Amino acid sequence: MEYIGQNIKYLRKSKGLTQEELAKNIGVNRAMIGSYEENRAAPKLSVLQDIAYFFNISIDDLIKIRLWTDAKTTAITDFVKGDNLRVISTVVDKDNKELITTVPIQASAGYTKGYADPDYIEELPHFSMPLIELSKDRTYRVFQIKGDSMEPIKSGSYIICEYLANWEEIYDGKPYILISKDDGIVYKRLYNKINDSGEIILKSDNPEYNTYSLKIEDVHEVWKALGFISFNLPESNELNVSKLHNMIMDMKNDIEKLKK
């Protein structure tokens, strides 16, 4: 039992919770959390069960393992505030720094079922990406996409995403990765109709694909797309913005000549 106080404190801080917030979630008063963390009191078995369930770990680990110094990577669960409580599993290193999990194409089907399972998330590739554009206080994930519905971003590209806890913050026309019950992992531009019809509209950049909608209750996760990594370098003869501009200018000049 000697590790339990420090373990509770470590787990609470890893979620950014105050003692009062943790106390409310496990059904005790704030003073008891302080007593546990300072080893002035030992939690009863029922409280241990509530703490272990809340942080998604075993009672044995809570009691016997020094979680704050354990060298192995550990899957943790982050409880996110919003209209509905949603759970997201992430992976941290031995210094409690959150790592970025990658979901390759071959893991797409499994992710739809295992997205909230810490054991499954821990099995996926994860890494640190030391970019100044990525905040230390937010959760990121990388999804590999398949298909041509969002070209010019090629199939096989990796989309770097930030977790979106509040789905009402979906901005119309912005690209997102959406995880749904029937469609799995999709990369689309979303349109927020949550308050009007309880739906999210999904639109492809490729006009050959039809726009469609999903009921909010069929959506598991939403990730805001920030950028992408691709190993499909463009060929020199591929259409680009500069060439398109020059083509438009040439057409404009030809039209002016015809008018004369």
Image: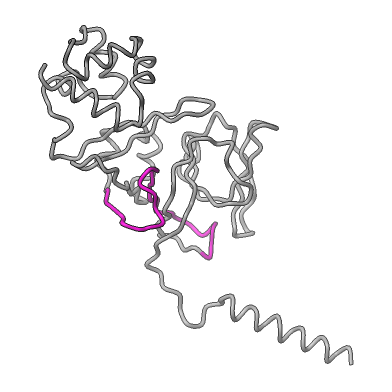
Position in image of residue 140 (x %, y %): 38, 46
Location of residue 115 (image quadrant) = top left
In the image, residue 202 above or below residue 52: below
Residue 118 highlighted magenta (yes or no): no
Position in image of residue 214 (x %, y %): 59, 37
Location of residue 22 (image quadrant) = top left
Q: Residue at x 43, y 59 (%)?
A: 228
In the image, residue 236 above or below residue 55: below
Name the side, left or right, on which 228 lies relative to 44. Answer: right
Is 19 or 259 nearer to us in this picture? 19
Location of residue 205 (image quadrant) = bottom right
Magenta range is 126-152
Position in image of residue 74 (x %, y %): 22, 36
Position in image of residue 1 (x %, y %): 11, 16
Q: Residue at x 35, y 58 (%)?
A: 131
Is 111 or 14 nearer to us in this picture? 14
Name the side, left or right, on which 83 lies relative to 48. Answer: right
Name the chief secondary structure element in magenta: loop
Is 118 or 209 nearer to us in this picture? 118
In the image, residue 248 above or below residue 29: below
